[in-house]
Amino acid sequence: MSGKKRDQQSEPVRLGALEQQVMDVLWDHGAATIRQVIIRLGGDLAYTTIATVLANLERKELVTPEREGRSVRYAPRHTREKHAAQLMKQALSTSNDPMASILHFIDEIDRRDLQLLRDYLDKSGRSG
């Protein structure tokens, strides 16, 4: 990989299963050390495994390490919701037909989420 910074606005990161679990711990509980992440994941994973996952998440610019004495705490760089929004934005930007993608998405979401979308569009003045 080159030394260029990742442009997360145009290139959000899809997460592997273990990366997702680690990010969920950080999103749910806030900054944590490697040992704290292991404990919150059930205590069955090797220290080096979680250290590698967190190093990869740091390289992908999803977490920020914070020195705390002799240990390091890792904090998410942005919220779970912002990450999800970036993934949706990328999906639309890579679609050959964004309108069709939006319509398929709306057909697939449940009524409660559809109502949230309607309410937001009405409130923001974007419905039409």
Image (spheres, rainbow, N blue to C red):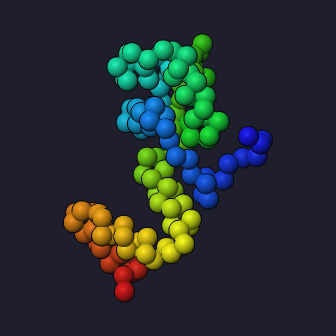
Q: Quadrant of residue 110?
A: bottom left
Q: Residue furthest bottom?
A: 128
Q: Residue furthest front?
A: 96
Q: Quadrant of the N terminus?
A: top right
- Residue drawn at point x = 53 percent, y = 68 percent: 95
- Residue drawn at point x = 50 percent, y = 41 percent: 15
Q: Residue furthest left?
A: 111
- Residue drawn at point x = 30 percent, y = 64 percent: 108
Number of callouts = 0
Q: Position of residue 112 (x, y in %)?
A: 22, 63
Q: Nearer the viewer, residue 21 or 77?
A: 21
Q: Quadrant of residue 118?
A: bottom left
Is residue 46 shown left or right of residue 105? right
Q: Position of residue 119 (x, y in %)?
A: 29, 72
Residue 107 position (above or below residue 11): below
Q: Position of residue 93 (x, y in %)?
A: 56, 67
Residue 55 position (above or below residue 14): above
Residue 67 position (above or below residue 88): above
Q: Quadrant of residue 44?
A: top left
Q: Nearer the viewer, residue 120 or 88?
A: 88
Is residue 23 visible in this depiction of the protein?
no
Is residue 69 shown left or right of residue 84? right
Is residue 121 visible in this depiction of the protein?
yes
Q: Quadrant of the C terminus?
A: bottom left
- Residue drawn at point x = 48 percent, y = 50 percent: 83
